[in-house]
Amino acid sequence: MATYLITGANRGIGYEYCRQLQTRGDRVIAICRNASEELQQLGVQVEEEIDITSDESVAGLRTRLGDTAIDVLINNAGIIKRVTLENLDFNSIREQFEVNALGALRVTSVLLPLLKSGSRIILMTSRMGSIEDNTSGSSYGYRMSKVALSMAGKSLSHDLKPRGIAVAILHPGLVQTRMTNFTTGGITPEESVKGLLRRIDELTLENTGTFWHANGEVLPW
């Protein structure tokens, strides 16, 4: 039984990670600001009132966890806010950087002592953070913050390889969640997470630092 820690676990992809991992018999530590009723009913370990943009809050999480060994750290928490060229809201852009990029790096840095050789770190990024794949523009805060997150993941993959820790940079696909307004053109969270878990299970030091789609496609930077 492996121990998985998932941020942004109260709903959507984060909740589905928790559900599928718990179903297959892994230990799950669910991190969120406020737990949803459905998360509470899963019976996993829930750590509430954690703000990944706060040094103090993440340090408090580290204290709560004690010497708990983490096999897989899934940095899933993220936000999206529409920022167009005609409405360049710089406060919104900063907020997306704080959550999507700096928050994940903060959590990884603080919890790193709980990881060991053989552990894995997952950064949930987005195809919208691919520079080559950007054919429609706009979404400045989200796109820019996800590029930053992917770069952090690539650097982590190099820095942590000597410690035996592998890193994956994952795009979940277009998923029917609240973040996407339950788009009718997307896949279900269940389908997405099945693919994501296959990528995580296949992650090794040989393919560390790869930017994958949940379906296994290697995405362009």
Image (cartoon, helix red, strand yellow):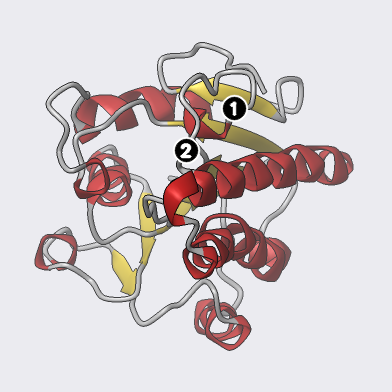
Mark seen at residue 68: none
Instruction: Pick the residue in front: 10 or 187.
Output: 187
Amino acid type, residue under disc 1 in the picture: Ser
Residue at numbered disc 1: 130
Instruction: Pick the residue in front: 155 or 174.
Output: 174
- When the figure is inspected, residue 26 is found, relative to residue 174, above or below; the finding is below
The quarter of the rendered structure image containing the C terminus is top right
The quarter of the rendered structure image containing the N terminus is top left
Amino acid type, residue under disc 2 in the picture: Ser
- Residue sitting at the far front: 86
How far across and how far down the image is residue 197, in percent? 41, 30
Residue appearing at x 85%, y 38% in the figure:
158
How far across and how far down the image is residue 20, in percent? 26, 39
Residue appearing at x 75%, y 37% in the figure:
154
Q: Residues within 10 Å of mark 1 (few under 14, many from 20)?
A: some
Secondary structure beneath dot 2 equals loop
